[in-house]
Amino acid sequence: MDLGLRHQLGLVCVILLLPALCSCQGFTKSRATFYGTSDGYGTPTGACGFGEFGRRMNWYDGRVAGVGGLYRNGAGCGACYQVRCLIPRLCDANGAYLVATDQGYGDRTDFIMSPRAFFKLGRNAKASEELKKYGTLDIEYKRVPCTYTGNVLFHIKETSSNPGYFAVVILNVNGKNDVTAVELWQKTQQRWEPLHRSYGAVFDFANPPSGELLLRFKVGPIWKIYKVPANWKPRFTYDTNLQL
């Protein structure tokens, strides 16, 4: 065969294969299933500790999931993923964009999705209904930057008591980095002291100082500082005016 012709045929093969190769770039193969709720949203009792926020998670509007190994002892709470199923005639090319809000294990699954999240896997409503009949699907997924609207929020957990015990969950953290540390400034000792990851995304501190609390939290390599008002109360959510 003429060398030029072989080169041309090789180029054609590369062109034909390139889209298939690119479509898998960055994705990991796994499996996903779904759980049931009366309204299709997530559950407020998830292991991440998001409470009622965990039902919708901002503009994701209930597209949430429980994760297994991706939970990472709570560090994976609030991480965002793109999940695509692998049945071409039924599955949407973009799939579902969702948030990890709970911990859950299925039959070799990485995701147990809310009904609203699972529905987004289908090309249309009819396809989504057909996908539900499978129960568990082969999927591919990758972590993507979160795109919450609004500022970072500090939600004081209902178990807190002023003074005596402080527990907080940090919401609306954009990007692809985890909240890896939260620290409180101890004025008398003139040092930062770490909060303990109680469970999921909840950080706590026993016997915090009275008055205003100066906190800083670490997202990737960045530290951000926020002052919690002296009259902080359990179940209250404070807008930090910070964005990531």
Image (tube, helix red, strand yellow):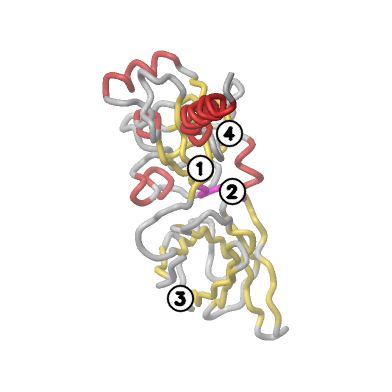
Camera-near label (4 vs 2) is 4
Looking at the rendered structure, the kind of residue marked 2 is Gly
Q: Which residue is mark 1?
A: 100
Q: 10 Å neighbourhood of mark 3: few (<14), some, or many (≥20)?
A: few
Labels 2 and 3: the sequence-earlier one:
2
Residue 28, which numbered label?
A: 4
Q: CA distance from mark 4 to mark 1?
A: 16 Å
Residue 44 position in % (x across, y down): 43, 42
Q: Which residue is mark 2?
A: 200
Q: Which residues are magenta?
A: 75-79
Camera-near label (4 vs 1) is 4
Camera-near label (2 vs 3) is 2
18 or 171, nearer to the observer: 18
Q: State if disc 4 and disc 3 touch (CB < 8 Å).
A: no
Looking at the rendered structure, the kind of residue marked 4 is Thr
106 or 29, nearer to the observer: 29
Labels 4 and 1: the sequence-earlier one:
4
Q: CA distance from mark 1 to mark 2?
A: 11 Å
